[in-house]
C-alpha cells in the first residue's frame, strides 16, 4: 500500500447499491474516495458518514455524468490528488421493445452509460500514465454479453463499455494502468427492484440474485495491487447466468 502514488478513488453513482458498496471497500483499503451522486444527496451523505465512521476519508461530489462539464470537474485533480482509481458505475435504464424506443430513450442511456465512461476515462488517464499507476474499472452488465429483450439501448451501451475497456487496456498497459470491466447479473438494488418479482431467480443457475457487496468485492480486487497483471478483461458476477 505504501508504494502506490498519492491520489484518490472516484466512484460515480456512489449513493447506493454497487457504487456505495464499492466506495466503502475502496475506503477500507486506504483510498480517499470521491463519492459522486446526481440527485440522491441523502444517500451519498450516508455513504460518506459510514466511511468516516470506519476511519476512512471521503468527500461528496455532486454531478451528472451525462454532462461533459460535470465529468471534467469531478475527475480533475484536487486536494485529494489525482484520480488514480476510477470506477465508472453510474448508469440508467429506459426499457422498452426496440420499435417503441424513442431517440431520447436511446440517447439518455448511451450518454449516461457509455459516453460518460469514455469522458471520465479520458480525463483520468493522463495523470494515471504520468504516475505509472492507475485502475479503471467499468461497470458493464450481463446484458452487454447476452440478449435481454426490452433493453436494446441498455445492452448496446453495456456492450460498448466492454469493447471500450478492451481497447483502452491495450493502449495503456505498458504505463502501469489497468482497465477492466465487471458485468453484474441480477443484483438486488434499487436499480433492479422493478424486475426482481416472480420467478426470476429460477433462471439463474445459483438460484438467487446477487448482492452489491459481491460485485464490489470484484471491483475492490481489480483496484488492488494483486490485480496488476489483469487488464482488458470482463469479470462476470452473475451466478452463472451468462455461462
Image: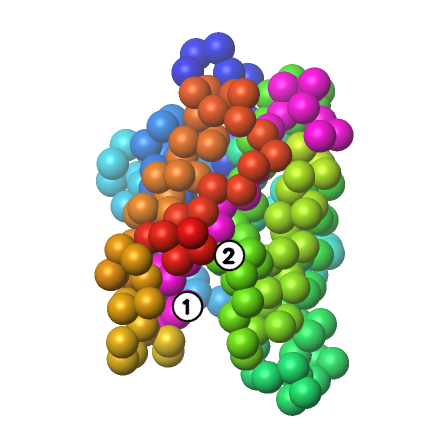
Which x, y percent locates residue 34? 49, 42
Which residue was labeled with disc 1?
191
Q: Which is closer to the viewer, label 1 or label 2?
A: 2
Tell me the distance, in whole angstroms, between the alpha carbons under discs 1 and 2. Answer: 13 Å
Number of numbered discs visible in the structure rendering? 2
Q: Which residues are magenta?
A: 170-193
Compared across the picture, whether 126 is left or right of 91 comes to right
- What is the quadrant of residue 85 in the picture? top right
Classify 54 as above or below 42.
Answer: above
Q: Secondary structure at mark 1?
A: loop
Which x, y percent locates residue 224? 44, 26
Which residue was labeled with disc 2?
141
Regarding residue 48, the answer to whether it shows in the image is no
- What is the quadrant of residue 32 in the picture? top left
Examine the structure image and report whether residue 180 is included in the region drawn in magenta: yes
Q: For the point 40% across and 35% down, which residue is it?
A: 220
> Where does the N terminus fall, quadrant-wise?
top left
Classify 103 as above or below 72.
Answer: below
Compared across the picture, whether 60 is left or right of 94 comes to left
As drawn, the residue found furthest toward the bottom would be: 100
56 vs 92, nearest the viewer? 92
Q: For the point 71% across and 72% down, which residue is it?
A: 107
171 vs 121, nearest the viewer? 171
Report the disc number at residue 174. Answer: none
As drawn, the residue found furthest toward the top would be: 3
103 vs 52, nearest the viewer? 103
Q: Secondary structure at mark 2?
A: loop
Amino acid at each position: 500500500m505504501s508504494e502506490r502514488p498519492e491520489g484518490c478513488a472516484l466512484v460515480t453513482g456512489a449513493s447506493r447499491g454497487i457504487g456505495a458498496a464499492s466506495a466503502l471497500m475502496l475506503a477500507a483499503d486506504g483510498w480517499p474516495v470521491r463519492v459522486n451522486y446526481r440527485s440522491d444527496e441523502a444517500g451519498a451523505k450516508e455513504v460518506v458518514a459510514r466511511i468516516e465512521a470506519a476511519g476512512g476519508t471521503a468527500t461528496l461530489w455532486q454531478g451528472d455524468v451525462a454532462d461533459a462539464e460535470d465529468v471534467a470537474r469531478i475527475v480533475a485533480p484536487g486536494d485529494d490528488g489525482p484520480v488514480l482509481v476510477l470506477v465508472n458505475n453510474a448508469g440508467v435504464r429506459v426499457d422498452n421493445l426496440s420499435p417503441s424506443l424513442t431517440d431520447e430513450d436511446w440517447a439518455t442511456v448511451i450518454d449516461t452509460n457509455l459516453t460518460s465512461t469514455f469522458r471520465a476515462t479520458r480525463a483520468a488517464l493522463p495523470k494515471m500514465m504520468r504516475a505509472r499507476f492507475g485502475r479503471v474499472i467499468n461497470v458493464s452488465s450481463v446484458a452487454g454479453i447476452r440478449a435481454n429483450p426490452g433493453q436494446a439501448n441498455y445492452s448496446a451501451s453495456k456492450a460498448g463499455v466492454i469493447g471500450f475497456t478492451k481497447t483502452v487496456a491495450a493502449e495503456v498497459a505498458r504505463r502501469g494502468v489497468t482497465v477492466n470491466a465487471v458485468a453484474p447479473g441480477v443484483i438486488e438494488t434499487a436499480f433492479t427492484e422493478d424486475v426482481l418479482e416472480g420467478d426470476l431467480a429460477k433462471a439463474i443457475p445459483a438460484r438467487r440474485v446477487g448482492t452489491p457487496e459481491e460485485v464490489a468485492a470484484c471491483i475492490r480486487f481489480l483496484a488492488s495491487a494483486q490485480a496488476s497483471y489483469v487488464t482488458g478483461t470482463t469479470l462476470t458476477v452473475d451466478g452463472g447466468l451468462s455461462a
